[in-house]
Amino acid sequence: MARNSGRVLAVAGACAAVSLVGQCFVPGPLAAPVPELSNFNPALAASAALPVLTLLAEDAEAKYGDSRRWSAVLVPLTTLVIPAAAMGIFTIYVSSDDAFYQFRAGHPRGMREEKELYSNPLYAGRKNPMEGLVNKDDFEKGLDEAWERAKP
């Protein structure tokens, strides 16, 4: 039986391969469609001409004077100015009343945002652990039964 099913599978695979052979090759010159000359695409023409424009560009080379000029600007900028500005902005933020309000319980801004969040119907009752239960009495009964079994 196993040999018979293997032969059937081989025959089915051969038939599938033969049926797909016609789609795998390019058609001959007599069967090819006639190209239309009226479909000119300017974007395609521009992208074909783009490699020619690279002949106009200068060679990329590092010049001694350029590196010194940029180093004179970028080194102080990245080591002095940007870190000093970042530290100053952070210091001003830390000294403000709203700094790290997410971690302060009872902060007015945090309470205002929480009130706005829970005014949305999708988040109403989010802190209620019984919200969304189908049968709350059955849930409470199950908790009581589990507590009775787990009592020492």
Image: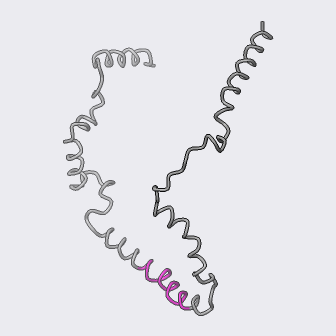
The C terminus lies in quadrant: top left
Decide: is 66 above or below 6: below
* Residue lying farthest to the top in this orientation: 1
Q: Kindly identify the residue that appears in the image at 55 percent across and 69 percent down.
A: 49
With 85 as the anchor, is 126 left or right in this view?
Answer: left
> In the rendered view, would you say 7 is above or below 91?
above
Q: How is the image coloured?
A: one colour
State the residue lying farthest toward the bottom: 65
- Residue found 37% across the figure and 76% down from its top: 88
The outermost residue toward the front is: 30
Please tell me whether residue 102 is drawn above or below residue 86 in the rendered image: above
Q: Is residue 43 left or right of residue 56?
A: left
In the image, what residue occupies the spot 64% across and 34% down?
Answer: 23
| Residue 137 location, quadrant | top left
| 130 vs 121, nearest the viewer | 121
Front residue of this view, candidates 68 and 107: 68
Q: Position of residue 107 (x, y in %)?
A: 24, 55
Start-end of magenta stretch: 69-84
Instruction: Please give left or right for residue 71 compared with residue 42 in the image.
Output: right
Residue 25 image position (x, y, % from top left)? 67, 39
Number of numbered discs visible in the structure rendering = 0
User: In the figure, is residue 6 to the left or right of 105?
Assistant: right
| 50 or 60: nearer the viewer | 50
Q: Residue at x 31, y 19 (%)?
A: 140
Based on the picture, tell me whether residue 89 belongs to the magenta stretch.
Answer: no
Q: Nearer the viewer, residue 17 or 78?
A: 17
